[in-house]
């Protein structure tokens, strides 16, 4: 059962003979398919449609990507970034969150799956062998939801055993879905962190279309916990509005009613932020969205964020609620300044490398 | 071309505005012209079962009626002529003689779609260029929204030459909100960008606080400003905007006030200015000083040097300067 609607599949002739392509098509044989030569013209056609972002989410493109698919997380200038790496076996997402940066970031609106998987696995291996760090964190949840397309594109079922055989790499699957059943039987050796983006139920209902409910996400996390996966949670983006305090407190409470804090490897916090162009796109697609009604202002990287005083208040309170459950829980801030770290925690990483080392220590302690 | 005939004004149905797109027409020049040299061009009428329907020449006929003329020179069309064809003739004729204001363009577009049932795609392709508008859906929707707004809004749009962006913004408010908005906006002096700012502020406050625009406009501080007769519209505008900013960004304005109070307490000389970073985001301050002579330069340096010893100055920058970067080793996890 596919929890989203695909109307048509486009198969780039380069990809049609791939084993993975055949596997995808077996599950989607009821859908109309069209063979295309290259993706340029197709993307151009979709971009000229009246609502390419919405239409693109209903059309699947199976193709190859010969560029680099493993890259440092783009992060943002003048802020601390944690040394994360992103892997992109697919781009775009069937879910439709109002605040999603991909609306502004991607220049290809189709759900796109890259089936030249061997190239990607080689790229990962080469990368892992060339790095000095003890642990490298890599995730597939940057340009898509890691698990939303798993029922048709079982990439995580390939990556989890792959990472289980590697010493240095820690794979993070970041999701807002609840489709974890296919992961439960896999050999993971705790080298895969399954993590969920969390928000209060009201925000999920109003702003995160096509995603699993909070209850479903936590139930899926509990299943993964039972199978020994390390878990991660990302309160990101935190939306600051009337009632935020009660709602986020309730969400944290709901989380730890279901999940053992000792099995949580990390929790991130990130206030809602956006590049200037995103606002117009979102207001056009989601006229009733409430996300821009906070006190948001541009910073040196031109991204809009809540007033610093507000962000500090949010993080201080969230950290307090989380660490009241277990003071040992590892909480970090995503794309924040040293100053904000210091105000929230009483200390700050010296630089990005220092923050990365902090993650290494955390992983060593967690996996001991 | 058919020849013109004299038709009695009494036989013309002035209430039938099927082919009219007039909105607040400016008749003075036409009155002067007709008064001086009479009617040069015949009007275009269509026979109805009883009397005549006006196709082209509404404004001329209104003036002639005012002047008490008994009849008019008119070219007559048969009942069989298609409505759409006549509307196109009317549009073309008006375009060659006077052109349309934005509200009239809106009425024309609205009639093409809702009265003459032309497909929106066809209106975009054929009629928007005819009206000198860019052929796209956004423009179509903008003008349709204008056609559907209240008379007061249309008048305001014409009078203040409101931009399309602001027309779109006005159309997002409810009818009730616009009823309050228009008199409020009319009491201010708003250029294009000021109007956009005020509309955005009102919209965002109303959505965030889930209140009607009327409640915001009735805010005692705003009413207080509007009732002060000695203020010019520009002064009122600036003060109203300040109140709206306070309502929209209470935390930021609170920080500004605190900073301003502390800055005042420093009694800085007029040649020294102290600034915080934009939106208090960065941990930095900026001081500027002006001088014309070496003596003034020395005086400024001396003052700045003394300022470093001032407790009030230290307190002002203290909160944002005490961050100690300890590094992750201090982190217990």
Image (cartoon, rainbow, N blue to C red):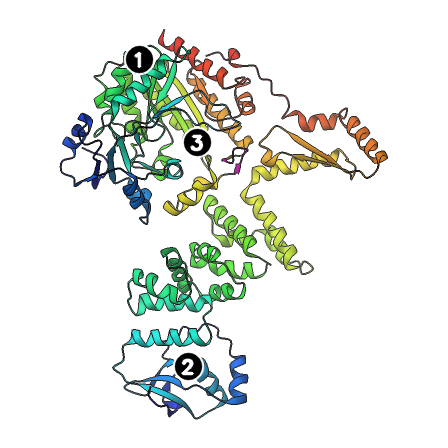
Per the model, the C-alpha gap separating discs 2 and 1 is 83 Å
Q: Nearer the viewer, mark 3 or mark 2?
A: 2
Q: Residue at x 44, y 56 (%)?
A: B168
Residue density around tag 1, few if under 14, some if 14–19, many if 20 or more, within 10 Å: some
User: Whole-percent x and y of residue A277?
Assistant: 45, 41
Residue under label 3, please give it. A238
Residue A143 in sight in this render? yes
Q: Residue at x 46, y 37 (%)?
A: A275
User: Whole-percent x and y of residue A1?
Assistant: 18, 32
Per the model, the C-alpha gap separating discs 3 and 2 is 62 Å
User: Whole-percent x and y of residue A201?
Assistant: 35, 33
Q: Is residue A146 above or below residue B229?
A: above
Query: Which chain hosts label 1?
Result: A
Q: In this rendering, do the residues under marks 3 and 2 share a single chain?
A: no
Q: Nearer the viewer, residue A36 or A281?
A: A36
Residue under label 2, please give it. B57
Q: Is residue A65 above or below residue B136?
A: above
Residue under label 1, please give it. A190
Q: Nearer the viewer, residue A292 or A18?
A: A18
Q: Quadrant of the N terminus of chain B?
A: bottom left
Magenta span: A295-303
């Amino acid at each position: 059962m596919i929890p989203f609607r695909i109307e048509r599949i486009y198969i780039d002739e380069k990809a049609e003979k791939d084993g993975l392509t055949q596997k995808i098509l077996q599950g989607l044989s009821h859908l109309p398919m069209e063979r295309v030569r290259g993706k340029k013209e197709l993307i151009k056609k979709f971009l000229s449609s009246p609502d390419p972002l919405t239409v693109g989410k209903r059309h699947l493109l199976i193709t190859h990507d010969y560029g680099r698919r493993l890259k440092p997380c783009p992060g943002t200038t003048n802020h601390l970034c944690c040394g994360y790496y992103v892997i992109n076996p697919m781009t775009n997402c069937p879910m439709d969150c109002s605040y999603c940066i991909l609306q502004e970031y991607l220049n290809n609106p189709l759900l796109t799956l890259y089936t030249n998987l061997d190239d990607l696995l080689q790229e990962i291996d080469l990368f892992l062998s060339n790095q000095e760090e003890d642990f490298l964190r890599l995730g597939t949840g940057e340009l898509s939801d890691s698990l939303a397309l798993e029922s048709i594109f079982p990439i995580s079922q390939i990556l989890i055993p792959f990472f289980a055989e590697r010493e240095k790499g820690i794979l993070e699957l970041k999701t807002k879905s609840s489709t974890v059943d296919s992961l439960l039987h896999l050999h993971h050796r705790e080298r895969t962190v399954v993590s969920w983006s969390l928000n209060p139920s009201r925000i999920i209902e109003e702003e995160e279309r096509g995603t699993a409910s909070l209850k479903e996400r936590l139930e899926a996390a509990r299943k993964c916990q039972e199978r020994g996966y390390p878990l991660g949670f990302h309160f990101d983006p935190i939306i600051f509005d009337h009632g935020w305090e009660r709602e986020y407190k309730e969400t944290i409470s709901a989380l730890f009613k279901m999940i053992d804090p000792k099995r949580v490897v990390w929790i991130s916090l990130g206030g809602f932020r956006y590049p200037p162009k995103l606002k117009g796109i979102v207001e056009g697609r989601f006229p009733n969205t409430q996300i821009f009604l906070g006190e948001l202002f541009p910073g040196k990287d031109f991204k809009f964020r809540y007033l610093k005083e507000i962000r500090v208040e949010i993080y201080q309170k969230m950290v307090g609620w989380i660490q009241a459950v277990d003071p040992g829980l590892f909480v970090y801030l995503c794309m924040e300044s040293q100053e904000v770290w210091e105000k929230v925690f009483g200390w700050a990483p010296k630089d990005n490398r220092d923050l990365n080392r902090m993650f290494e220590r955390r992983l060593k302690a967690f996996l001991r | 071309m058919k020849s013109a005939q004299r038709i009695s004004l009494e036989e013309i149905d002035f209430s039938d505005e099927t082919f009219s797109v007039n909105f607040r027409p400016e008749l003075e020049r036409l009155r002067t012209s007709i008064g001086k040299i009479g009617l040069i061009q015949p009007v275009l009428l269509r026979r109805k079962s009883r009397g005549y329907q006006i196709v082209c020449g509404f404004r001329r006929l209104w003036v002639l009626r005012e002047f008490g003329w008994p009849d008019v020179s008119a070219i007559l069309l048969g009942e069989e002529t298609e409505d759409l064809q006549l509307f196109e003739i009317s549009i073309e004729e008006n375009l060659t003689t006077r052109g349309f204001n934005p509200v009239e363009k809106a009425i024309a577009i609205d009639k093409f779609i809702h009265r003459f049932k032309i497909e929106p795609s066809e209106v975009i392709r054929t009629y928007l260029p005819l009206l000198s508008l860019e052929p796209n859906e956004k423009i179509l929707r903008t003008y349709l929204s204008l056609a559907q707004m209240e008379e007061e809004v249309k008048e305001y749009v014409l009078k203040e030459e409101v931009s399309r962006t602001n027309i779109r913004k006005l159309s997002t408010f409810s009818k009730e909100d616009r009823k309050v908005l228009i008199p409020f906006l009319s009491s201010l002096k708003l250029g294009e960008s000021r109007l956009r700012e005020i509309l955005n502020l009102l919209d965002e406050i109303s959505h965030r606080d889930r209140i009607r625009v009327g409640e915001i406009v009735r805010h005692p501080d705003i009413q207080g400003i509007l009732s002060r007769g000695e203020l010019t519209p520009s002064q009122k505008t600036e003060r109203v905007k300040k109140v709206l900013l306070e309502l929209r960004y209470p935390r930021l304005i609170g920080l500004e006030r605190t900073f301003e109070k502390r800055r005042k307490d420093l009694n800085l000389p007029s040649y020294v200015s102290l600034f915080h970073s934009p939106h208090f985001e960065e941990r930095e301050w900026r001081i500027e000083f002006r001088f014309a002579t070496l003596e003034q330069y020395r005086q400024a340096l001396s003052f700045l040097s003394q300022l470093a010893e001032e407790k009030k100055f230290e307190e002002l920058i203290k909160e944002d300067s005490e961050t100690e970067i300890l590094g992750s080793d201090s982190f217990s996890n």
